Amino acid sequence: MTLRPGTVTGYETQFDFPMREQPPERSYLLASVPRSGSTYVSHLLWATGCLGAPLEYLNFQPSGPYGFASKSLRAQADLWRAALHRRTSPNGVFGLKAFPLQLEGVNEINPQLVASVMHTMFPRGARARVVELRRRDRTAHAISYARALLSGIWRQEQEFDDRPEPEYSREAMAQATRMIEQQESAWQAMYRDLRVEPLVIWYEEVLADPTAAIRAVAAYLDVSLDPAAAVAVPAIERQSQIGARAWAERHGAD
């Protein structure tokens, strides 16, 4: 992932909460699929200062925020511990954003870490909490995913390099649709195995009324929101929709 020099992603230490020695009192998973608006939603929850900072603390892909740890199991474990101590909000809430393919990739090379993560996120004898983010507009979701897979552009900050708009592809649309369905099915299987009843929120509804979405998540987690606890987080800029609209027109014509 190529970003502009100096791009702020939110993983910088300047955005840490005060150091916390104790483990989180309450943990939740923000379960999603790529291109569902999860970065926007995670920052929305984070900004409250009461719902943790649910970012991708297991993203060790070379192009990801922790790419430098992609081949070091020790560094990955250290980063996870640091997240628990520095990304738990002062009221004891910790959030983790993840995608199924991301978890599967980490499990292939570092199953011990995944076991530790599962123990933290779903402690035995405690209520498991999962907030699942989905998109109602399946076509728009598939278009967004397909274009990102073809172009390699996943964030607005990458649009500076003038890469050409990928040509519409039925095959890419079909692949993206399969990947979305497979990952959503993976989450459903996990819920059954862990007997989790997730809170499902829809990206389109979050855009329409972000305050209502925040309140719904807080109520589900049994967390009180304190306006005085709000924190400054990096702004999320929406990517250009020109290419997506062109794909939607072509898809409709097909």
Image: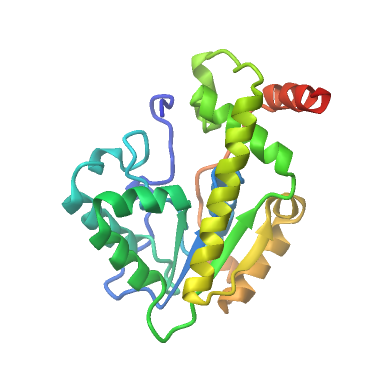
Quadrant for residue 165, please give it: top right
Q: Position of residue 184 (x, y in %)?
A: 57, 54
Residue 237, can we see it?
A: no
Rendered view: 170 above or below 132: above
Query: From the viewer's perspective, is 112 left or right of 250?
Result: left
Query: From the viewer's perspective, is 78 left or right of 213?
Result: left
Viewport quadrant of the N terminus: top left
Q: Position of residue 244 (x, y in %)?
A: 69, 27
Q: Nearer the viewer, residue 75 or 145?
A: 145
Q: How many labels does the image show?
A: 0
Rendered view: 94 above or below 246: below
Give the residue at x 43% y 32%. 7
Viewport quadrant of the C terminus: top right
Rendered view: 204 above or below 65: below
**Which scheme is used to colour this image of the protein?**
rainbow
Q: Position of residue 8 (x, y in %)?
A: 43, 37
Q: Position of residue 241 (x, y in %)?
A: 70, 28
Residue 162, can we see it?
A: yes
Give the residue at x 44% y 48%. 101
Q: Which residue lies furthest to the bottom in this view?
A: 125
